[in-house]
Image (cartoon, coloured by chain):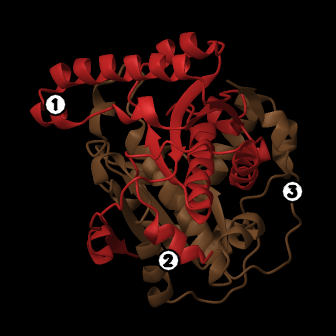
Chain colours: A brown, B red
Amino acid sequence: MDLFEAIKERRSCRDFLNEPVDNETLFKILEIATWAPSPLNLQPWEFIIVRDQVTRENIYNEALRCKNWGQEASGWDWLGKYSVEFLKNVPVMIVVVGDPKKTGLDAFLEEGNVGYQYACAAAIQNIHLAAYSFGLGTLWFTLYDKKNIRKILNIPSEKNPLSIICLGKPATEIHTPKRKDIRSKIIEII
Amino acid sequence: MDLFEAIKERRSCRDFLNEPVDNETLFKILEIATWAPSPLNLQPWEFIIVRDQVTRENIYNEALRCKNWGQEASGWDWLGKYSVEFLKNVPVMIVVVGDPKKTGLDAFLEEGNVGYQYACAAAIQNIHLAAYSFGLGTLWFTLYDKKNIRKILNIPSEKNPLSIICLGKPATEIHTPKRKDIRSKIIEII
């Protein structure tokens, strides 16, 4: 698949067909993902593949709890319309777990340890693109408390379950959200 | 260019030819970059294009200061061999500035505000890939104190200059760093 086509046509998907995604495809997507750059090439990512229904329902319950809490904390009424039901139906979740020790000099900088997280985010973008090239839809999901996701998935406290990528065949066509004119995003040329 | 070729063949480049990169190419790369997903499609990225020699030298000096400080703080002697001289010679830097207000519910979560940073990191991965497809090398650079980079570039304190992408024609071929077997990175299938 063409690089620019993948980058521009990938959409965030919240409506999945009830069709399984096999391990072979997932392994290919994840192998591609790990070609992302990382601090000192430390490859700080690990992946948990979740298909089990009880585990997905536990994650759904945590997301629902977090959504309701967030709605109250933010005062954003429109969140009421934002459904997390798709978490029950998505055939696969990929939990991306980052290792804060694999971060290079970032560990010593005052602004906090983000290098390993940036690398994981780059790998996640690769997951989106590779999945799209296999005809799969994805969603970058982060609406949960990490300590609760650690409990559900038995992730040790020193690791960071930084995102969950929902993945499956899209059930519906997804409209293209607009992008701002790039000239408004280039704030200075020095 | 083929998606998988771009993802797998992109290398981190630290040795650039002294050849300019025109705005037209940069605008194309940045336009592609902004097709990354972001929380609530808030598109939290802004870009500063730096070619000016004095500004690049100021950034170099800050990186050198940070490297020397980091070497002392970490006790990593091998950092002495890690040169930041290429910052003086790279034809263009793209400073990626994130807006912490454009982050969705993340702003209310106890783990801190990372959603907008993850989105910027995904856009940065797109920059790497798009630049590679134009025959350009890139480096994801973060070895600086943000407050000093804010001063050098007049970035307001409420914005986050989260990464600098060095960009130009590669002067030398770059070897392919190894990746761990993907089976060692999939820690569980549930």
SS of the residue at dot 2?
Answer: helix
Label 3 is placed on what type of residue?
Pro
Marks 2 and 1, Cα distance to the nearest angstrom?
A: 37 Å
A51 sits to left or right of A185: left
Chain at numbered mark 1: B
Q: Position of residue A76 (x, y in %)?
A: 82, 34
Disc 3, disc 1: CB below 8 Å? no
Q: Position of residue A36 (x, y in %)?
A: 44, 60
Label 1 is placed on what type of residue?
Gly
**In the foreground, A8 or A121:** A8
Q: Position of residue B83 (x, y in %)?
A: 27, 34
Measuring 10% from the left and 31% from the top, which residue is drawn there?
B77
Measuring 69% from the left and 71% from the top, which residue is drawn there?
A6
Residue with the mark numbered 1: B80
Above or below, B55 relative to A82: above
Residue with the mark numbered 3: A177
Task: Give the total number of marks visible in the rendering.
Answer: 3
Measuring 45% from the left and 87% from the top, which residue is drawn there?
A23
Asked if one can make out residue A143 in the rendered structure from this viewpoint, the answer is no
SS of the residue at dot 3?
Answer: loop
- Observer-side mark, 2 or 1, equals 1
Q: Position of residue A101 (x, y in %)?
A: 26, 42
**In the foreground, B112 or B147:** B147
Tell me the quarter of the picture where residue A141 sits: bottom right
SS of the residue at dot 1?
Answer: helix
Residue with the mark numbered 2: A29
Chain at numbered mark 2: A
Residue count near mark 1 (Cα–Cα under 10 Å), binned few <14, some 14–19, many ≥20: few
What is the quadrant of the C terminus of chain A in the image?
Answer: top right
